[in-house]
Image (spheres, rainbow, N blue to C red):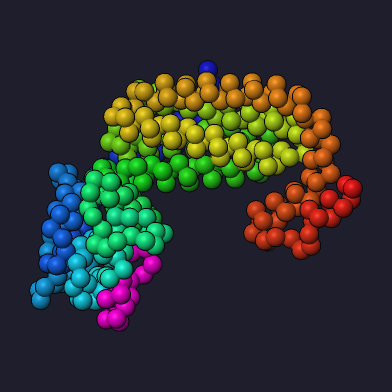
Amino acid sequence: MQLPVDVTKLLDEMMSIDEARATELSLSVYVDDKAPADLVAHVRGVFASTLPTVRMTLSYLDGSFIPHPNDDMAIMVAGDSASVGAAAAAVRAVGVPVMIVTAIPSKVERLAENGGHAVPDGDIIAPCDPEATDVAEPIALNDEALAVLDDRMGSWIVAVCRDKRLALAIAFPFMRRALAADAVLITSLQNAGIGLVPIIPGADLPIMTLNQAKMALQIAAAYGNGMDTERLKELLAVVGGAYLCRSLARQLAEFIPVLGFIIRPSIAYGGTAAMGYAIIEYFEGGQNVAGVAATASHVGEWGGKALSTIRSTAKRIMPVVNSKVTEYAPAVEKIVTSVASGKGWPEGNLLASADKAAN
């Protein structure tokens, strides 16, 4: 059977994952002696690694503090010392990204600003929702709070340390889900773009399938699962997911042809995201890559049932919907095309004009 995916590119991706496993990492944990002992212990614990490729240095913010310019990243565990802002600025000055982990984020931010060393937005990481406004400080470090802290630290590393994010996730398990979620988001957006602009009919399937397979590889690697050429056959179960997305988009486009330019990217995004999160949940359950095929199969079964329901429903309501959609389609397509191309919202109230013409 000829598979709609370039296996050599998947092998290249596997090689890049092997390279990430062999990547040497260097990081420093700087501790404010006024930081809570339980917070210090937690940070030290999650950044401890037994891998020979990882070098972690622990030091205190005292008179002998000197930033390490060759680090890939730094973590500063802060209490209410006035020196934290200046120390973080010194680390950034040697070109090393640094996050400040604390249970008193408002006070740390205020002390840094008062000392003339304001911390960049997003670099203060606390065990709470950053949008919350009624959190009592110091924040209690219970299991739930520490789980939030790990998630936020992982998201920061994925966003800031882009070049070595996979190597870091392999070294530090707490950030696996953040990396996996990032892979799902990026792949879903890529496939949505492919669905929006189908250059050659049918050419979208191999590209979307390759993207989904690479996503599965990245998720597997993040959760510590290796893959050889035999396991690669199991990974290709995601081909079914790509076929399902394409079939669903085609069926819906037949019912509402004038909105195909919206349907295709929407289904490509949603189907890829569903596949990605199904694989994440599988690995979160402690399973290994051998079960990816079964997970993909379950997603495919669900999608098939959804497609059957959509078909039967659409046959009843689409004649009415199509008559209205046709009237608005030119205006909607102009808006989507303009926004997608980066030109912004077109001038004039296009939908209002279409509504007036329809009535």
> Which image quadrant is residue 160 in?
bottom left
In the rendered view, would you say 94 is above or below 349? below
Q: In percent of the image, x 51 and y 36: which residue is there?
A: 272
Is 225 or 271 nearer to us in this picture? 271
Relative placement, left or right, of 285 versus 184 is left
Looking at the image, the residue that sits furthest to the top is 1
Residue 82: x %, y % from top left: 21, 76
Q: Is residue 6 magenta?
A: no
Q: Position of residue 302 (x, y in %)?
A: 53, 23
User: From the viewer's perspective, is 179 left or right of 210?
Assistant: left
113 in the magenta segment: yes
Q: Quadrant of residue 124?
A: bottom left
Name above or below for residue 328 compared with residue 107. above
Number of marks drawn: 0
From the top left corner, tell me how far across and down residue 129 is, in percent: 37, 55
Q: Quadrant of residue 169?
A: top left
Q: Can see residue 209?
A: yes
- Extent of the magenta region: 109-123
Say if 245 sits above or below 339 in the image.
Answer: above
Question: Can residue 55 be seen in the rendering of this structure?
Answer: no
Instruction: Decide which of 56, 127 is in the foreground and name it.
Output: 127
Residue at position x 38%, y 32% from top?
A: 281
Residue 67 location (% of width, % of height): 19, 69
Q: Main secondary structure of the magenta part?
A: loop
Residue at 12 percent across and 67 percent down: it is 33
- Left of 356 or right of it: where is 228? left
Viewer-nearest residue: 135 or 357: 135
> Is 51 rendered above or below residue 57?
above
What residue lies at 27% left-to-right and 36% top-to-bottom? Answer: 224
